[in-house]
Image: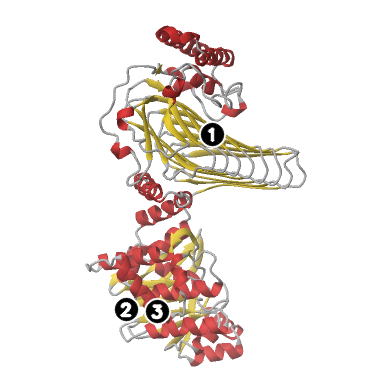
């Protein structure tokens, strides 16, 4: 307890340092928002195991480390090409320790009505960008408040009404410095009748521990479409906390794919609000863990209006001593009649020591809805292994084939061809590595 | 080709096979019949190397190698094939990929060059005709959502691709309508040759009208209690298994 109080004070002190560095900016609306956020963070403090939301995920190790928020003086790496999706023609924004790296980014020739830029550019006048912080302020989440308190940079993707963005947007966040805490913010606004694809990826250039505390706020306008990917492949000693808040308007279509391969401790919180009628919302997820990794996926799908569909499909492969948490909340408000919600969480445990806590949580206040959920936890099917072996395929190869097939069900749903191929490759390599350690 | 001597096997401590003796030579087709629970499927699984069964005694050699010393994949690479009674569904594994992976393992084992996807597809297309299967099967996950008949035809397709020396068909006829039975039997017959052998495990004589065996053995309580030519199958069909059981009880007593 004392440790956590101390750690809270430590971050409050880091905020004071940050303020010192700001000079004239300190009197702007942007900074007023930061001050409100740090005040709320101070009231909330870090969550503990007594918080129902954090029961199976301990942040004790994260709080033991002196992760310093980065707000200035970032060194630019020279080589990030290999971290981008190979062969994908896209608009690229690169961030190093949460800060925009103009020299590594490519955003030329944007179509009219489209903004793909660093938030720092938008914020430099000290004025808040409309919609920024709308979803996270007062959400009661200490990590989001901390992110807001240190808000300095991030990505802004704005697709104007009726624009079908011709290329995907890649947002690459790399951690370059040991013991750094990056607090990037992503704001995606797809206006009415527009469509876009956004790929957020997170990687480490340092082999040392670092902390990414990211927040994304997304608005999908009426009849708009957004295909959103979040790929986290940071190093095995990294800490990664993320929040994704999505507001979906009438007749919109939103697809989210959340893939976690890296990190010592990862917590992904996804909250989608279906606030209009006739929305189609999809949440897909995959996590592959080994060693002592821990991955926690927390999703909340909120149906507020009638005639919406949500489809949620998360799968996990857990090896060694790794652990996972899946909590899938679906909240159907009284007005949301004719809701059709489906949720599945399937897990493959490759060792006796690996562990997954999966908890579907349906809260339904409407009486004419279709909601179903299913959670499974299993091992590799021995009958299937024998079947493959009886066709001449060796045991190790059989395991590899089956594990890849299990994870493949998520990867094959990726709509962007180049990204799908890259993920097949990366997830495949990862699984190969995981399976190779089996007896 | 296959020599089984006093083979005994158990599952979870329960003895199922209690001393099987059988010799299968190249060019021969043997039928193994018997009532439910006599150990027919266990024999097939033990020969293929299923690890749930423990071999508690006896020996088996295949092409003069110790069969029981090999893992299932090695047996397959040596040329032994089991057509499963209940083929396993493998979601997410495409049929062509599955077939090609197995096929290439055989090539590797024989020191031959592996086949690329294009050439392999041409080979499989040819083999599909044998089992009167549509090419769309190849794009589907292994056995997933296949009907009973489709699963069995898929087993014969695998056999056609892998070209085993010894095929063991475990109740490949069960649950088939007459058309599927004919297709499966035609496939098996077409693949048979003087340098190959087959063991047909079945409960019913019907399949043996299509695949004509050289020898028929009756398995009862884990032992072969009667052997004969193809006419033995007809006799069993007429008289049922009780007749053999009575004889066997007499003999065993």
Which of disc 2 and disc 3 is earlier in sequence?
Answer: 2
Q: Which residue is mark 2?
A: B1
Judged from the image, the secondary structure of the residue bearing numbered disc 2 is loop
Residue A37, position as x, y percentages in the image: 55, 16
Judged from the image, the secondary structure of the residue bearing numbered disc 1 is strand
Front residue of A367/B131: it is A367
Image quarter in which the N terminus of chain A is found? top right
Residue B70, position as x, y percentages in the image: 33, 63
Q: Which residue is mark 1?
A: A218
How far is disc 1 from disc 3 in space, using C-alphas? 71 Å
Front residue of A402/A335: it is A335
Chain ID at mark 2: B
Asked if disc 1 and disc 3 are in contact, CB closer than 8 Å, the reply is no
The label shown at residue B124 is none
* In the rendered image, the vertical position of residue A164 relative to residue A124, given as above or below: below
Chain ID at mark 1: A
Front residue of A183/B35: it is A183
Q: Quadrant of residue A95?
A: top left
Q: Are marks 3 and 2 on the same chain?
A: yes
How far is disc 2 from disc 1 in space, using C-alphas? 68 Å
| Numbered label tally | 3
Residue A13, position as x, y percentages in the image: 46, 8
Give the residue drawn at x 37%, y 64%.
B72
Q: Which residue is mark 3?
A: B22
How far is disc 3 from disc 2 in space, using C-alphas? 11 Å
Give the residue drawn at x 55%, y 37%.
A191
User: Mark 2 or mark 1: which is in front?
Assistant: 1
């Amino acid at each position: 307890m004392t440790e956590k109080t101390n750690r809270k004070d430590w971050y409050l002190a880091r905020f004071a340092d940050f303020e010192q560095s700001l000079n004239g900016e300190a009197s702007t609306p942007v900074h007023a928002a930061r001050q409100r956020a740090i005040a709320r963070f101070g009231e909330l403090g870090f969550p503990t195991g007594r918080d129902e939301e954090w029961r199976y995920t301990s942040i004790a190790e994260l709080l033991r480390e002196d992760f310093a928020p980065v707000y200035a003086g970032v060194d630019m790496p020279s080589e990030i090409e290999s971290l981008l999706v190979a062969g994908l023609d896209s608009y690229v924004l690169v961030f190093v320790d949460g800060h925009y790296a103009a020299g590594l980014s490519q955003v030329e020739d944007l179509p009219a009505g489209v903004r793909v830029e660093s938030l720092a550019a938008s914020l430099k006048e000290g004025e808040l960008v409309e919609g920024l912080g709308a979803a996270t302020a007062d959400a009661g989440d200490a990590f989001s408040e901390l992110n807001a308190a240190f808000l300095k940079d991030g990505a802004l993707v704005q697709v104007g009404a009726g624009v079908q963005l011709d290329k995907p947007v890649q947002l690459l966040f790399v951690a370059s410095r040991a013991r750094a805490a990056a607090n990037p913010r992503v704001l995606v606004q797809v206006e009415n009748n527009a469509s876009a694809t956004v790929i957020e990826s997170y990687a480490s250039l340092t082999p040392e521990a670092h902390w990414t505390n990211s927040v994304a706020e997304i608005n999908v306008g009426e009849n708009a479409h957004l295909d959103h990917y979040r790929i986290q492949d940071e190093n095995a000693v990294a800490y990664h906390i993320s929040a994704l808040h999505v507001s979906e308007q009438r007749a919109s279509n939103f697809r989210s794919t959340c893939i976690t391969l890296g990190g010592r401790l990862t917590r992904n919180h996804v909250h989608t609000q279906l606030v209009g009628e006739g929305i189609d919302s999809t949440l897909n997820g995959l996590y592959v863990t080994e060693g002592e990794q821990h991955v926690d996926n927390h999703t909340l799908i909120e149906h507020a209006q009638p005639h919406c569909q949500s489809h949620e499909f998360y799968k996990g492969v857990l090896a060694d001593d790794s652990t996972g948490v899946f909590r899938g909340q679906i909240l159907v408000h009284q007005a949301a009649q004719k809701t059709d919600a489906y949720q599945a969480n399937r897990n493959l445990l490759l060792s006796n020591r690996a562990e997954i806590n999966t908890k579907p949580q349906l809260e339904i206040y409407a009486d004419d809805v279709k909601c179903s959920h299913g959670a499974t936890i299993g091992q590799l099917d021995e009958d299937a292994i024998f079947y493959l072996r009886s066709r001449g395929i060796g045991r190790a190869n059989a395991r590899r084939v089956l594990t890849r097939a299990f994870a493949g069900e998520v990867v094959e749903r990726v709509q962007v061809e180049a990204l799908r191929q890259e993920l097949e490759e990366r997830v495949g390599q990862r699984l190969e590595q995981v399976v190779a350690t089996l007896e | 080709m296959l020599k089984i001597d006093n083979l005994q096997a158990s599952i979870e401590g329960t003895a199922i096979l209690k001393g099987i003796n059988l010799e299968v030579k190249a060019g021969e087709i043997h039928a193994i019949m018997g009532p439910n629970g006599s150990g027919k499927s266990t024999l097939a699984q033990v020969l293929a190397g299923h690890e749930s069964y423990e071999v508690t005694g006896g020996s088996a050699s295949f092409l003069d190698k110790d069969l029981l010393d090999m893992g299932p994949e090695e047996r397959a690479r040596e040329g032994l094939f089991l057509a499963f009674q209940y083929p396993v569904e493998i979601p997410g594994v495409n049929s062509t990929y599955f077939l090609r992976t197995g096929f290439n393992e055989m090539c590797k084992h024989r020191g031959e060059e592996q086949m690329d996807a294009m050439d392999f597809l041409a080979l499989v297309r040819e083999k599909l005709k044998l089992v009167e299967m549509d090419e769309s099967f190849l794009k589907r996950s292994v056995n997933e959502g296949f009907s009973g008949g489709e699963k069995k035809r898929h087993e014969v397709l695998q056999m056609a691709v892998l070209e085993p020396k010894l095929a063991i068909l475990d109740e490949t006829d069960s649950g088939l309508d007459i058309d599927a039975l004919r297709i499966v039997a035609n496939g098996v017959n077409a693949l048979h040759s003087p340098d190959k052998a087959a063991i047909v495990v079945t409960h019913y004589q019907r399949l043996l009208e299509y695949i004509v065996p050289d020898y028929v053995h009756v398995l009862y309580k884990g032992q072969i209690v009667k052997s004969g030519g193809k006419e033995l199958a007809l006799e069993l069909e007429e008289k049922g298994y009780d007749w053999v059981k009575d004889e066997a009880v007499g003999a065993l007593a």
